[in-house]
Amino acid sequence: MNTISKIILGVLVIAALFLGYKIYEKKSVTDSLTENIPSESTSTQNTTETPVVKKTLLTPPGEGSTEAQLRAWGELVSQSALPGTTLEIAGCVAVPEAMALEAGKDFTVTNADNIPHTLVLNPTTTFLIPANSSKTIKADFGKGPGIYAFSCDNRQEAVGVFLVK
């Protein structure tokens, strides 16, 4: 094997190692975003969305998350949030799961069930939605624009997110 062939072979090996590392690095960030997320989903809002993406959307990064994890979740919410003024709740399933709202503007939450539901943004920000009724809420959750995950009743996991712009 002549010298030129050895150099070309060496460059190809280095390029392959570099590309392999970059793929591994990207996969590590994605894996950390979906770590410990069950693979099945109970909502039927968007059947083309994979269960992992859906669960990742509803699972905000926790304390100690990296800037890359926070940014990736924010981008996922931004891409998934549907503009609207009405959120429907039935069986504690929110439709749409991700909704874009204008800061300070009103939106409506409609409860299609025969029992009341409580929309919970945090322990001090809750909204009681009467059975078979609607409630108008101002998209101002005390902190201005941002991403707000919410749960329903006493559930620990989020059932949806608001992107307040």
Image: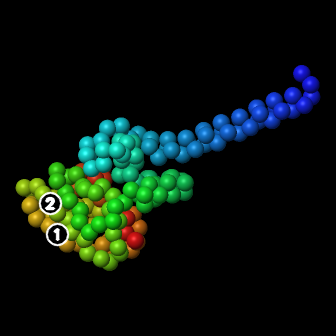
Query: Is 144 placed left or right of 93 in the picture?
Result: right
* Identity of the residue drawn at 65% across and 36% down: 20
Query: Is 4 placed left or right of 82 in the picture?
Result: right
Residue 111's tag is 2
Locate the C terminus and report the quarter of the image it occupies.
bottom left
Residue that extends furthest to the bottom in the rendered view of this protein: 104
* Identity of the residue drawn at 40% across and 54% down: 60
Say which element carries label 1: strand
* Identity of the residue drawn at 23% across and 66% down: 86
Give yes or no for contact between labels 1 and 2 (Cβ–Cβ under 8 Å).
yes
Asked if residue 66 shows in the view, the reply is yes
What is the x, y in percent for residue 136?
19, 72
What is the x, y in percent for residue 58?
35, 52
Instruction: Tell me which numbered mark, 1 or 2, is placed earlier along the sequence.
Output: 2
Say which element carries label 2: strand
**Does residue 44 lie above or below 121 as drawn?**
above
- Neighbour class for label 1 at 10 Å: few (<14), some, many (≥20)? some
Given residues 150 and 164, the one toward you in this image is 164
Q: What's the residue type where badge 1 is placed?
A: Lys
Residue that extends furthest to the right in the rendered view of this protein: 3
Give the labeled residue for mark 1: 135
Given residues 90 and 150, the one toward you in this image is 90
Q: How many marks?
A: 2
* Identity of the residue drawn at 36% across and 37% down: 39
- Neighbour class for label 2 at 10 Å: few (<14), some, many (≥20)? many
Residue 143's tag is none
Residue that extends furthest to the top in the rendered view of this protein: 1
